[in-house]
Amino acid sequence: MTSAASPSPVRVRFCPSPTGNPHVGLVRTALFNWAFARHHGGTMIFRIEDTDAARDSEESYAQLLDSLRWLGLDWDEGPEVGGPHAPYRQSLRGDIYRDVARRLREAGHAYPCYCTAEELDARREAARKAGRPSGYDGACRDLDPGRIAAYEAEGRTPILRFRMPDEPVTFTDLVRGELTFTPENVPDYGIVRATGAPLYTLVNPVDDALMEVTHVLRGEDLLSSTPRQIALYRALADIGVGKGGVPRFGHLPYVMGEGNKKLSKRDPQSSLNLYRERGFLPEGLLNYLALLGWSLAEDRDIFTMDEMVTAFDIADVNANPARFDLKKCEAINAVHLRRLPPEEFARRLVPHLQAAGLLPAEPSRDALRLLAEAAPLTQERMVTLGEAVGMLGFLFVAPEDFRVDEADAAKVLGPDARPVLLAGVKALEELPEFRAEPMQDALRAAVVDGLGLKPKVAFTALRVAVTGRRVSPPLFESMELLGRDETLRRLRAALD
Ligand code: GLU
Ligand code: ZN
């Protein structure tokens, strides 16, 4: 218990299982916990729920850490930073769980269940037919020692089952308000496998209790496990595990994807790696994910994480399902991208150009200078950093590797383009100063006035010949950056 004078400091946890690739739903959960902790000056715990050896992987574990680091969602206790409740990987906490399971059993909060899968199935089926609740029927709740001995003699190995109280469980969800679950709907449930391996149902609340978690903010898909967990926290308090508090719960709304179906981990749209590879900014992606259930203010879609932390209140989270809208996510990212100082924007392009083989691992000073000059030309035109590969590649590609986009060439570099290219070459050869402004005047005179063409038509042919695509940074600046020799070489190549 805490006194009013010294409120318990907020302690939240982000506790994913390391299976598969991190996905946006997971990131939303991490973000809301983090924002809540930071808003209250509390503690963010990062715990790895890796008790399922068949599904957990080291690779996924490493990706989780890397993803949170990339997003800037820092944690105060957990892997790599340690803390008073270490270790923070459940696979390293087996002794703790075995001890707690034994004590729960000794105190009568849990009991061995010897039912086989076939027996359970048959009784479930019968109950369903009779219109009775079809969950576990409590058959092993009060086995006498003789019965137990007989089962053991048969060679059966029991699971450990938690004994749910016979009265309803009521709690006030921070998002959904008061909820009540009646005993018929929350049967006794397994907490330790027949192999002795502890289950999520046990280890998650045990660690919350030991780590003194005050608030559990997680997805709505876990709502049905909450009454079971609340009963377990009470039993843990009874046997002296943890400080005795039951955390407050807040269940974050479902995220819907295409066709109004729940966005699933397997949905390609939900893979965090995809957003990283495309070049979303952490600040853009987090801003968008924050809107999946929360908003800073009406008509206020764009904000920084500092602004979110200042304003975040779990009571403002909306219980209605949120819709994942990729277009909106992109638009928000584009705004954050434009907000970056130009040098920072250029710096963030580097890994994308490197991944595409356009910059070496150790770029030269000249290459970085070129990038610094070119980047601002594209900053207003990009939605994600990855677009730099297509837009700026023409400046960094080796002359022998330069190719014109075939579809664009077919559209604008046909026979009609010949006079344009010829006039362009001539004008640029004669230009005393190879800079954007005089170039614009000279080309306008040569191809627009000289040939009587619309600027768009005339300049698109030049653009495709020089930058390789119809979408590029501004043409004259692009030519200036490319230099006279290479510009002329490309125009002549297009003529051939
Ligand atoms: N490891 C659980 C999961 O990833 C955590 C659930 C919870 O937040 O309690 O689903
Ligand atoms: Zn049983």
Image (spheres, rainbow, N blue to C red):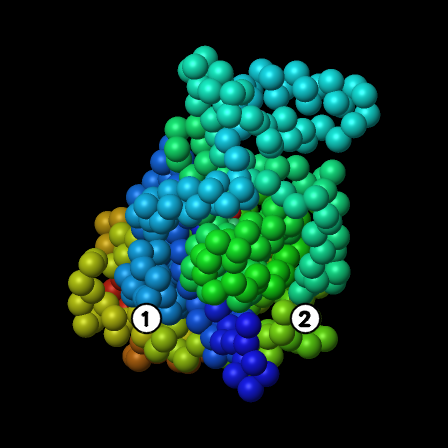
Q: Residue at x 81, y 21 (%)?
A: 130
At label 1, the amino acid type is Arg
- Residue 478 in the image: x percent, y percent? 38, 68
Residue at 56% across, 81% down: 3
Q: Is mark 1 within 8 Å of ligand 1?
A: no
> Which quarter of the rendering shows the N terminus?
bottom right
- Taking the spot 67% from the left edge, 29% from the top edge, the residue there is 137
Q: Amino acid at mark 2?
A: Ala
- In this view, the residue farthest toward the top is 154
Q: Total number of numbered labels?
A: 2
Vertical placement of 404 versus 29: above or below? Answer: above
| Residue in the image at 60% along x and 50% along y | 231
Q: Is 8 rendered above or below residue 242?
A: below
Q: What is the x, y in percent for residue 492?
A: 32, 55
Location of residue 234 by image quarter? bottom right
Q: Pick whichever, 196 or 226, lies toward us.
A: 196
Q: What percent of the width, then of the height, locates residue 342?
A: 39, 78
Q: Kindly report which numbered mark, 1 or 2, lies closer to the viewer in this rendering.
A: 2
Question: Tag 2: Cα neighbours inside 10 Å, few (<14), some, or many (≥20)?
Answer: few
- Is any part of residue 137 visible from this angle? yes
Q: Is residue 345 above or below residue 146?
A: below
In the image shown, does 490 or 289 lie closer to the viewer?
A: 289
Q: Position of residue 132 (x, y in %)?
A: 78, 27
For disc 1, the marked residue is 347
The residues tagged by marks 1 and 2 sit, at their Cα atoms, a distance apart of 39 Å
- Taking 304 as reference, is 252 left or right? right
The residue furthest bottom is 5
> Camera-side residue: 242 or 66?
242
Secondary structure category for the residue under label 2: helix
Do the CB atoms of the residues marked 1 and 2 lie less than 8 Å apart? no
**Tag of residue 315:** 2
Task: Give the mark, 1 or 2, whose residue is nearer the N terminus.
Answer: 2
